[in-house]
């Protein structure tokens, strides 16, 4: 069999093109159970007879040939029988372990339905229960005791061409706090969305848990806990681990391998971002990804209020990673509108657990200092809202119900169209519900949340579709664009470009229905458009390492997108009678 050019390869297979280049085949040396029990290769009863014979699996499967559509139907029927979301999560993860193409076919068949299961809010619950839901390990577990050996551990990872790593140390999982090694659910879930929403090939993605211990007493006592059973190691040893990890990843996979930081605690998140952002191809999703999605929502909101960013006074409840990231990007957006930075900063206010952030106050970190205002101290959010009369409030403190009835009503009394973003995750931590926002503002509130809320119908019949400021609008598309052109560093301009691109994809109809983001079921298109913009930007600013520059950037990005269709295996021909080989298909 001569199949010509090798297109892509993984540890399990190689992609070959036919001689006339019209067809692509998968070639593997694996046989028997090594094929059917390998999620990258397995296609269950969708293997053809020729493939079954050639791969040594004839007889290991029932003698029926099913199309992927029928397999999808089977999965959906099973899925409907599950009794709660955690069961659905476990079921989907099981599918990912058995048949990867089918798993992504399921996710992409109705992304709006499945995203809340593989991502927030259910992934939060899954992380809390990781000891229970744990079936098969996925990703790489590196501990503080593996220092000086990370290169060896990375060699154990079978894939040779990793383009995107998502790493966590599990210290601040969503708004749920320190979940230690249970936090691995987050990189796994995020990377599932890299593929489902962004089209990055799953073989090119690597989830990593850096286990340095946990402060979570319950986990330390939990017999099912899967992580190191001691308190967090901090200081120099921690920093050395991170330094070694960054170097080992880029030594093995190249300086253009994207490393996304996820759910690190505040102090480490800022520090590590500052330390690595100009050295590696890296970003922190909680700071920069959140910033892009929140600013995208604000830019869309400006189309409703017919105003500029610099016309707004924005108050944050919370002054952590999310708040700082968003505030920095708002500042950039205002500067772009033409006012100096000092003036921008005067329009951004923050309340943390100690009250309003003002000059001279105690407990001001370097990050908070930048947003400290000349103003007397104030403690309560309600009082701050009354005093400042903001045009927008953004909740990112994981304090459930922080936007009280009084606050929402006040916002509605100061503003024709108050902007109210309740971004804390998971749903149980939201500052207010979509219903509270729309009812208390008589439908005038411009609302976005971190976790999904159902549409709300007011007593007068008006129906609103709350915007979900979901980072999934950002990181899969950024991941695709950055890895496509091998972007050297990911600058803040990339995130402002991201916010502008997402906002530009919101239609007037979306806005009229209350949506500040494109509908979730269009997210693959959003990621694609975003990736193309990033590739164009990278070449324009000499930041792309990939040479030569692709002429047609759209076609180039499209050619990289992972397909959920099964590949044909390269086999020698061997035939059964035609009538015995009919493939069972169905109309979905
Ligand atoms: P963080 O730990 O860095 O920051 C939390 C901040 O809240 C800190 O500044 C803390 O001082 C403040 N805080 C705590 N209690 C408070 C109180 N009672 N009153 C006022 N402030 C208080 O966490 P983070 O990364 O900024 O995330 C915060 C929340 O935002 C989480 O729930 C997270 O899930 C959510 N988030 C949402 C999105 C999104 O919707 N796309 C993205 C990122 C983060």
Image (cartoon, grey):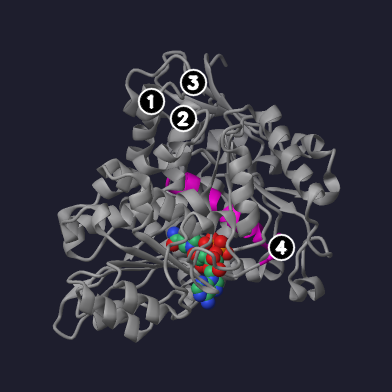
In reply to whether residue 191 is colored magenta, the answer given is yes
**Distance from the alpha carbon under mark 4 to that under mark 2:** 32 Å
N-term mark: 4 or 2: 4
N-term mark: 2 or 3: 2
Contact between labelled residues 3 and 2, with CB atoms less than 8 Å apart: yes
Q: Quadrant of the C terminus?
A: bottom left
N-term mark: 2 or 1: 2
Q: Which residue is mark 2?
A: 484
Q: Which residue is mark 4?
A: 180
Q: Which residue is mark 1?
A: 556
Residue 221 left/right relative to 519: right
Residue 415: name its quadrant.
bottom left
Q: Secondary structure at mark 4?
A: helix
The reply to whether residue 174 is visible in this rendering is no
Dot 2 crowding, Cα within 10 Å, few <14, some 14–19, many 20+: many
Q: Which residue is mark 3?
A: 546
Depth-wise, is mark 4 or mark 2 nearer the camera? 4
Q: Which residues are magenta?
A: 178-199
Contact between labelled residues 1 and 2, with CB atoms less than 8 Å apart: yes
**Distance from the alpha carbon under mark 4 to that under mark 3:** 37 Å
Residue at coordinates 42% horizontally, 17% vertically from top-left? 21
Residue at coordinates 45% horizontally, 37% vertically from top-left? 480
Depth-wise, is mark 1 or mark 3 nearer the camera? 3
Residue 149 left/right relative to 538: right
């Amino acid at each position: 069999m001569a199949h010509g050019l090798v297109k892509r390869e993984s540890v399990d297979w190689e992609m070959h093109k036919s001689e006339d280049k019209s067809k692509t085949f998968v070639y593997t040396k694996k046989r028997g159970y090594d094929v059917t029990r390998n999620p990258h290769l397995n296609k269950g009863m969708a293997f053809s007879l020729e493939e079954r014979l050639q791969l040594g699996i004839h007889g290991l499967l029932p003698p029926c040939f099913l199309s992927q559509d029928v397999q999808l139907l089977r999965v959906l029927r099973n899925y409907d029988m599950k009794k709660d979301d955690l069961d659905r999560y476990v079921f989907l993860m099981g599918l990912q372990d058995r048949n990867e193409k089918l798993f992504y076919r399921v996710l992409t068949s109705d992304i709006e339905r499945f995203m809340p299961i593989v991502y927030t809010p259910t992934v939060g619950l899954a992380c809390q229960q990781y000891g229970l839901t744990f079936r098969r390990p996925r990703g790489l577990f590196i501990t503080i005791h593996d220092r000086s050996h990370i290169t060896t551990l990375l060699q154990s990872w079978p894939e040779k061409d990793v383009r995107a790593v998502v790493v966590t140390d599990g210290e601040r999982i969503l708004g749920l706090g320190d979940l230690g090694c249970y936090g691995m659910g987050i990189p796994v879930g995020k990377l599932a969305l890299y593929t489902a929403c962004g089209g990055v090939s799953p073989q090119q993605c690597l989830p990593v848990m850096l286990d340095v211990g946990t402060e979570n007493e319950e986990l330390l006592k939990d017999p099912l806990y899967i992580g190191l059973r001691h308190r967090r190691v901090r200081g120099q040893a921690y920093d050395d681990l991170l330094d070694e990890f960054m170097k080992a990843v880029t030594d093995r996979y190249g300086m253009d391998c994207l490393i996304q930081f996820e759910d690190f605690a505040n102090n480490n998140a800022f520090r590590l971002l500052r330390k690595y952002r100009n050295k590696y191809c890296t970003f922190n999703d909680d700071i920069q990804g959140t910033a892009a999605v929140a600013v995208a929502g604000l830019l869309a909101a400006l189309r409703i209020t017919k105003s500029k960013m610099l016309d707004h006074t924005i108050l944050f409840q919370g002054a952590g990673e999310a708040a700082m990231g968003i505030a920095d990007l708002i500042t950039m957006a205002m500067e772009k509108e033409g006012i100096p930075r000092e003036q921008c900063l005067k329009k951004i206010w923050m309340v943390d657990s100690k009250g309003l952030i003002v000059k001279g106050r105690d407990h001001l970190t370097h990050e908070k200092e930048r947003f400290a205002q000349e103003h007397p101290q104030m403690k309560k959010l309600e009082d701050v809202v009354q005093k400042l009369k903001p045009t927008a409030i953004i909740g990112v403190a994981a304090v459930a119900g922080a936007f009280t009835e009084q606050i929402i009503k006040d916002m509605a009394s100061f503003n024709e169209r108050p902007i109210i973003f309740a971004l804390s995750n998971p749903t149980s931590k939201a500052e207010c519900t979509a219903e509270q926002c729309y009812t208390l503002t008589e439908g005038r509130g411009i609302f976005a949340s971190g976790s999904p809320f159902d549409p709300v119908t007011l007593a007068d019949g008006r129906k609103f579709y709350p915007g979900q400021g979901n980072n999934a609008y950002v990181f899969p598309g950024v991941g695709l664009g950055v890895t496509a052109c091998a972007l050297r560093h990911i600058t803040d301009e990339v995130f402002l470009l991201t916010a502008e691109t997402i906002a530009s994809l919101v239609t007037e109809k979306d806005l009229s229905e209350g949506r500040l983001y494109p509908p979730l079921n269009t997210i693959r298109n959003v990621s694609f458009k975003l990736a193309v913009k990033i590739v164009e930007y990278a070449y324009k600013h000499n930041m792309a390492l990939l040479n030569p520059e692709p002429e047609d950037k759209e076609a180039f990005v499209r050619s990289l997108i992972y397909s959920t269709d099964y590949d044909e295996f390269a086999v020698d021909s061997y035939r059964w009678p035609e009538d015995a080989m009919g493939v069972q298909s169905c109309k979905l």
